[in-house]
Image (tube, rainbow, N blue to C red):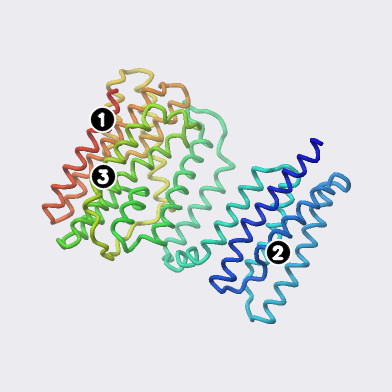
Amino acid sequence: MVALANIAEKLVLTLALGCLIGIEREYKKEVEKKIVIFGIRTSILLALLGFLFAIISDTIGITSALAIGIATVLVISTVAFITRAIVYKFTGATTYVAMPIVFIVGFLAGIGEYGIAVTSAIIMTAFLAIKEELHGFVRGLTREEILNAIKFAIVAFVIFPFLPDTTISFINPKQFWLVVVLISFLEFVTYIILKSYGENKLILTGIFGGFINSEATVQKIAEKSKDVRIENEAFVGIILANASMILNRIIIAPIVYGSLFILRNFVLPASIAIIIAILLCYKAIKTKTKLKVNIHSPFSIMFALKFALLFLFVTLIMGFVSENLSLNILYLISFIAGFIASSPVVASTALIAAKGIIDIETAGKLILIACSSATLNKFFWVRYSENKNLRKSVTIASLIISLILLIGALF
């Protein structure tokens, strides 16, 4: 009875995942009128085929079942590929690649690898759904951005395996570089969204650009804000860039620390600051000016190396101060360094907290102080604007947000 219930559970999951992928394919075929060979029924059948091969794998072995199953699907997908090429004169390879993946998703569900099956299905569906956006993003890339991304990938993933996995003065080189790569990749994903949807809109540029580099974003928006007609939108873009910066730090901290536990002492004040920033912008969102603001890609060697050097430098200083000097000096360092670049400060704070050099409560205060300082530095960057009213309104709003973060650090 238990075995039957287990099989039924796997079968339901298989059908659900096949249906999920199939709905996206069916939408492309029926609504967007794309040339798609398989829809919801075929997707479910492919996942079911994978499930059945998983069931018989107990008899013939997992390797044999998987090999025979994939070979079968490849024959089917090859026939479909050739048929589409002949009938529709279309040779896109998406269907050819997607069909075996649907089979593997069903197979994984059938052998009980639920997590991998669900994650794979969701990622696959997402990539299929945003195909046009990805193509648009790639078309918008410059040759320099592509070369920078290639160079970064080489340095990030070729060098990584050769880094020592040992702790040197409380820093593990392999873990340290992994943090740099993860943060760069996170910001690169945001950059893709910005290039695809918000590059010509000041408000969206503020939101996504602030997540990547709030200082550069504020400077770029300020430079474009000479025209009084876009004053409100420029204000919103700058303040939301700061709110997005705070959100970025909320995400960075647990990535470096390795647990959401570090959020305990600073996430509430940080969240309140973000909410206040949004409320300050609410009445100013009136216009929808299209104005191009260029934000540089974070997926480059120089971008990563600058972050890595600052990260390393601040970590060593904060580690030394934590072990040998008073906490007041540590708070001062966090404030000064945060004014220059808060992301390395947050990453360094999370790292030394993970090593047990400082406690979670102290780490939370340091992160809030760094975010407060990073908010105050918008006074400097907004000076690039010739609009006095904008400079004044940004200064007042930044003071309010910074004060909320500092109060959170005190309690």
Q: Please state if 184 lies on the left or on the right of 277 as rendered.
A: right
Task: Residue 266: give x, y in percent of width and height.
Answer: 36, 30
- Locate residue 72 relative to residue 383 in the image: left or right: right
- Residue appearing at x 33%, y 27% in the figure: 365
| Residue drawn 36% across the image and 60% down it | 198
Residues packed near mark 2 inside 10 Å, few (<14), some (14 to 19) or many (20 plus): some
- Disc 3 packing (10 Å; few <14; some 14–19; many ≥20): few
The x, y position of residue 155, in whole percent, is: 51, 49
Relative depth, front residue between 287 and 317: 287
- In what quadrant of the picture does the C terminus appear? top left
> Is the residue 364 above or below the residue 71 in the image?
above
> Which amino acid, mark 1?
Leu
Residue plotted at (32% across, 64% down): 200
N-term-proximal mark, 2 vs 3 = 2
Residue named by callout 1: 406
Question: Which badge, 1 or 3, comes first in the chain's sequence?
Answer: 3
Residue identifier under label 3: 279
Mark 1, secondary structure of its residue: helix
